[in-house]
Amino acid sequence: MFYVFGALLKISLGAWTLPLAACAGGVLSTYLVFALAQTRNDGRSSIMLLLLTGLSINALFMSGIGFLSYVARDPQARSIIYWNLGTMSGASWNSVVVLGLVTAIGTAAALSFGKPLNALMIGEQEALALGVNVGRLKWVVLTINVLMVAVATAFTGIISFVGLIVPHILRIVRGPDNRFLISGSALLGGTLLSLADLIARMCVRPAELPTGIVTSVVGVPVFLSLLGRRQYLF
């Protein structure tokens, strides 16, 4: 929507315009998922219902993106297509500064919740007995994740499987301690993404392959192999 209507709305906040628009969209979609998935009187939802609602909201938003791609002019349509495929070809120092600040602040904030998240792994009732405010913890951590992912996706587009595979690889290597997983995922995820971007720039020179294609081609077999490990449970 920003690529098509951003110029018409004449809203400009410099390098922060795109990430703020992405954050607004991420918060809206997340709120819709949780609002539509609530079936209990206490406002809680089953995991399966959250997943199915999330898939439905994703399909709705993707249809909107498809419509905007259809009505957009050629430069705008190409921007939307490349954004859907995921690419870092449009990186600039302004985007690096914005993304770096958001990532550093978000990672530090997430690390401060490492121990409560570890307590939550043994069960909600057990975490409550240990003094963890489970409801508040979920919403705070979810908000941090939504904002970080929205800003990153705003600049690079949809790059699949990095955030899905990296934490599970680290769980196999080092265990489920969230204090390690949060920092380790940031470092290993950035490293793998840089390698994928390097491959995307070199394999079809002088053209550049979208990074999201590389991560999907490599990520799908790795993810399926993780699913096939019977001794490992997600």
Image (cartoon, grey):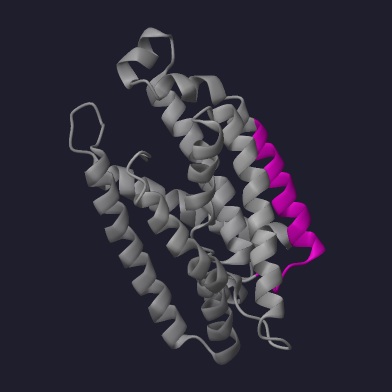
Is most of the magenta stretch helix, strand or loop? helix
- The quadrant of the picture occupied by the C terminus is top left
Instruction: Please determine whether, in this image, residue 118 is positioned above or below residue 182.
Output: above
Q: Position of residue 205 (x, y in %)?
A: 71, 86
Q: Is 182 or 177 nearer to us in this picture?
A: 177
Residue at the (44%, 87%) spot, across then down: 71
Residue at the (58%, 47%) spot, across then down: 148
Instruction: Please determine whether, in this image, residue 80 is positioned above or below residue 226.
Output: below
Q: Position of residue 116 (x, y in %)?
A: 49, 20
User: For residue 208, which quarter of the picture?
Assistant: bottom right
Q: Is residue 125 magenta?
A: no
User: For residue 44, which quarter of the picture?
Assistant: top left
Q: Is residue 103 magenta?
A: yes
| Residue at the outermost right position | 93
Q: Position of residue 61 (x, y in %)?
A: 37, 66
Residue at the (55%, 40%) spot, across then down: 170
| Residue at the outermost bottom position | 74
Q: Position of residue 65 (x, y in %)?
A: 42, 74
Residue 12 appears in the figure: no
In the image, which residues are magenta? 88-108
